[in-house]
Amino acid sequence: MNSYRLLKSLKLRIFIVMMVIGILPCLAVGACVLLNYERRAVFEKTVDTTNRCRAMANHIVELGYSSESDNSEISEELNQLSEFLSARVLVVDSDYRVIFDTYSMSVGKTLISKEIVDCFTEGVSASNRDRKNQFIEMTVPVTDNTGEGSVIGVMVTSVPATSISDSLAVLKRQTSIFEITMAIFVFVISLVLSQFLIRPFDKISRAIGSVREGFDMDPISIPDYLETEAITNAFNSMMKRMKKVDDSRETFVANVSHELKTPLASMKVLSDSILSSEDVPVETYREFMVDIGDEVDRENKIINDLLSLVKMDRNADTLNTELCNINELVEKILKMVRPIAQSSNIEITLESAREVNAEVDRTKFSLAIMNLVENAVKYNKNGGWVKVRIDADHQLFTVEISDSGVGIPKDSLDHIFERFYRVDKSHSREIGGTGLGLSIARSAILLHRGAVKAESREGEGAVFTVRVPIKSAAGT
């Protein structure tokens, strides 16, 4: 496990990459130098030896070379060439028989090879290196001087290549010393640079690690690289978001505490008033008990709304969808709300552009539409109106709820779906609002993979538009 974590280290990976980039070219250069030197040395040795053999081939022809003659002068010349080159020189006649051998070992024997045959047939020189036995063998044609240029013999020269091997070994040692030196140098440079290059990320780690409690720290800025700048910008954005969430949580807790405390305080005042008075009339008792009952109902509504929100948050992926007639479902909701609307002389109408059948969670969707319609009624004017319009296309259906109410200020439109947010707190408390209705509606719509949008001008009413997929994602 520790080895695996070590391999995940960016510093180690940078170090390894730099080592590979630094050392591999050195090894490649060293190998190329050795290879080129060897090729060049063999080439020069071959060319030099071949030129000398050509000159000797021409010279022995001038001395009266013949496969039938036993010319001591030719033998002496060949021996001198052999000593000069430290090589073995043989001459093969047209019958592939050795007629001269500076080592006097193969005279009279037959010697055939591809190179010798090519010399006789094509008149070309050839060379072949034997790495195992460390020598280079060259074949040079011996041509007559009659003007026809026919090949009358082949000179075979075997030159030792030990000098090339010895020089190559020395060069290898020097190259190895250079490579080791470069490897040490690259190791140090890689170690230093990997430490230096990773330093900005260490700064980020320390900056993030310095966050212990709260989100009131200053934004961090490490613009060393574009990557570190992007990371710090993302971190700062996350911190702002977390601070916003934390502030929202604190506000939510404060609002919940306040909303739950207010009915209890009212009930406490009412009960203390009854207990502190003597000979209180029955009518007063009855009036106070009705008020206490109203506060209990108010407390119960707040708790039920909170439980609805919590239940939706916990079951964010759980929808008991079924195919429902949206027109009939909305009509039932409006029937339940109309008695409340009639008490304020508010007219509720339903307009259906077409029959809509969609897969929804009947309970949750009804709760969302109920809250939106109740909200339109509560914040309406006496004698006003609420219009509900249903429409659909091939993918989505729309429920539009418009009213002639007090409207919503522009600066509040972005906050009306927040929990416990109320535009006019005094009016909301007067009509019994908890500030949770729109939050519940929005949560229920989001569960259906839908969206709800509000449009309004203060004093000119509001329009809430709900869009929900006809085919539920949960049912597919």
Image (tube, rainbow, N blue to C red):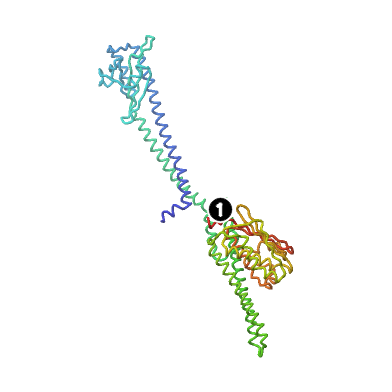
Q: Is residue 372 left or right of residue 66?
A: right
Q: Position of residue 50 (x, y in %)?
A: 38, 21
Q: Classify residue 308 by image quadrant.
A: bottom right
Q: Is residue 360 visible?
A: yes
Question: Residue 112, located in which quarter of the rendered image?
Answer: top left
Percent position of residue 422, x then y: 67, 68
In the rendered image, which residue does mark 1 sit on? 228
At which x and y percent is residue 275? 63, 87
In the rendered image, residue 194, in percent from the top left (x then y), is placed at 49, 50
Query: Residue at the location (61% across, 52% down)?
Result: 394
Q: Nearer the viewer, residue 15 or 373?
A: 373
Q: Horizontal placement of 178 versus 237: left or right? A: left
Quadrant of the image occupied by residue 117: top left
Relative depth, front residue between 258 and 9: 258
Q: Quadrant of the N terminus?
A: bottom left
Count of labels shown? 1
Extreme top residue here?
146
Residue 10 sits above or below residue 50 on the image: below
Query: Which residue is drawn at the image coordinates 42% and 37% (left, top)?
Result: 30
Residue toward you, 303 or 110: 303
| Above or below: residue 78 compared with residue 467 | above
Q: Is residue 143 above or below residue 326?
A: above
Callout 1 amino acid: Thr
The answer, for residue 453, to whether it is visible in the render is no
Mark 1 crowd level (few <14, some 14–19, many ≥20, 10 Å Cα): some
Badge 1 marks a residue whose secondary structure is: helix
Question: Farthest bottom residue?
Answer: 279
